[in-house]
Amino acid sequence: MAFRVSSRRLCVALTAPRAALVNPISKRYASSASAAVAQSNLPKGLKDSIAKEAWLPNSDPAESSQTARLVNDQLPFMVPTYVRPPPMFEKGEGCYLWDVENRKYLDFTAGIAVNALGHCDPEMAKLLGQQAQTLIHTSNLYHNPWTGTLSKSLIEKTLESGAMHTASKAFICNSGSEANEAAIKFARKVGKVVDPSGEKYELVSFHNSFHGRTMGSLSATPNPKYQKPFAPMVPGFKYGTYNDIDGIKDLVTDKTCGVIIEPIQGEGGVNVATEEFLIALRKRCDEVGAVLIYDEIQCGLSRTGLLWAHGSLPSEAHPDILTTAKALGNGFPIGATIVNEAVATKIVTGDHGTTFGGNPLGSRVAHYILSRLSDPELQKGVLEKEKAFRKHFKALQNRFPSIITEIRGKGLILGLQLSQDPTPVITAARERGLLVITCGTNTLRFVPPLVISEAEIEEGMKILGEAMAAVFEESREIEGTKGQQEMQDS
């Protein structure tokens, strides 16, 4: 135990200030300290841990750490649904997180595009406390002041933004999967009304999409790894190729009741749908009487610099149903399904419902978050920050031309396509104080808080450059971090 404490103190002394690590004198000091440890009689595992912590500012917690003890105590009681890296986070503020051992991390993930206003926004925290002392839940058997207020605001702000010009009503739920589940059910109901024979029931989605993990939304997510353990899927789903205009006619037929698509595929690799493709898809849906659903759970709510990612498209490309969640609660679980009048008139009392969805606490929080995220100044800032990221991406691409093959995305949903496995970069970045995640195949994904500053972008990109250099230019062996995306092949 004494060895552990003293070695930890040595590591803290060596790793405390980030600036010291870029100072040649400090590097020599760390190097000489590591050399001294290497010549000692300490056990090899402890020597390796000390050397690693002396070199890295945010080295992952060791097996003997407080974090590891907490994790090992808790894991036996948790269903093994996620692979998580070693740190355990306990505090957040703005664009930063701190773990239980007080390591500080700049967060380029925003909880997978959730914390658009950053961690622990002060006004949101204040509002949560106020509402929690007023009214939290009554169920949907009764009216409350906030469900309708949020619904009205969603419709009004959507129309004001120039997106979904037919937006009429909203269904408030608890998550993105539930928002998509509602959209799928609504499309099926429309199909039943349009064609009482029951033949109009097919739903179309696209390869590399991710719509959720409930049985309906999973059936719309054509990833064999996730579908196979729960097969058979909900019947009636067909899958097409994203941006393939020529394939639309055979894909969307008279049997199609609905088409669900992400204007920007997040989990699938930050793939952007072309305007021509979405216009053609809308036209075909009109021809066969199918409902067009835009899943903007990850790309919506000003992440592209517009309230909705499809907001720059002409009205002939707008959807009948729009789904949202993630940033809507800035960490509080809430989602919404927005529909036009043609859909709304076919949904009657009893067709759908939710116990917790639209509770006063969640709805009031979301109403506040929506007011912040729809601010034109915030949206303008998103576009300026995109330019800053792209400038750094281009510099990295020039530095690693054989590694970075493409820069994708819009606003602050961006991707770097790599020619190699990016998971060692995830590890190297985290151990230098930056959190970044992956998506698709060999894609680094950047979905930081929308309130991130250009100084923080500069800081993070400097760390990313150091991480990529450690992986691709140095001879160090860095173990990749798995599980850093929702939809992953391995």
Image (cartoon, rainbow, N blue to C red):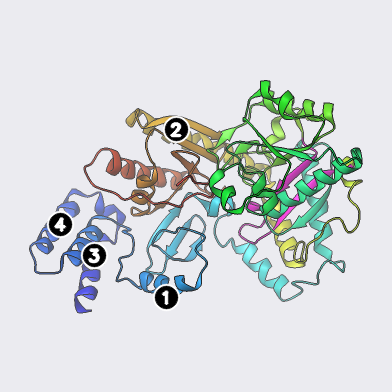
Q: Which residues are magenta?
A: 319-341
- The quarter of the picture where residue 250 lies is top right
Q: Which residue is label 4 attached to? A: 29
The disc placed on residue 240 is none
Q: Toward which corner of the image does residue 71 lie, by quadrant?
A: bottom left
Name the N-terminal-most of marks 1 and 3: 3
Q: CA distance from mark 2 to mark 3?
A: 35 Å
Label 1 close to label 3 by CB (< 8 Å): no
Query: Which labelled disc corresponds to residue 11?
Result: 3
Type of the residue with mark 3? Cys
Say which element carries label 2: helix
SS of the residue under disc 4 = helix
**Name of the residue lying farthest toward the front:** 232
Q: Which mark is residue 391?
A: 2
Give the camera-side residue of 296 and 12: 296
Dot label at residue 73: 1
Q: Quadrant of the N terminus?
A: bottom left
Is 325 colored magenta in this rendering? Answer: yes
Relative side of 24 to 244, left or right: left
Q: Residues within 10 Å of mark 3 (few under 14, many from 20)?
A: many
Amino acid type assigned to the residue bearing label 4 in the image: Tyr
Residue 207 position within the rendered picture, expressed as x and y whole percent measured from the top left: 60, 36
Q: Nearer the viewer, mark 1 or mark 3?
A: 1
Mark closest to the chain's N terminus, 2 or 1: 1
Q: Are marks 1 and 4 in contact (CB under 8 Å)?
A: no
Which x, y percent locates residue 127? Answer: 68, 66
Task: Give how far apart the Cα atoms at labels 3 and 4 are.
Answer: 12 Å
From mark 4 to mark 2, how far is it between C-alphas?
A: 34 Å
Which of disc 3 and disc 2 is earlier in sequence?
Answer: 3
Question: Which structural element holds mark 1?
Answer: helix
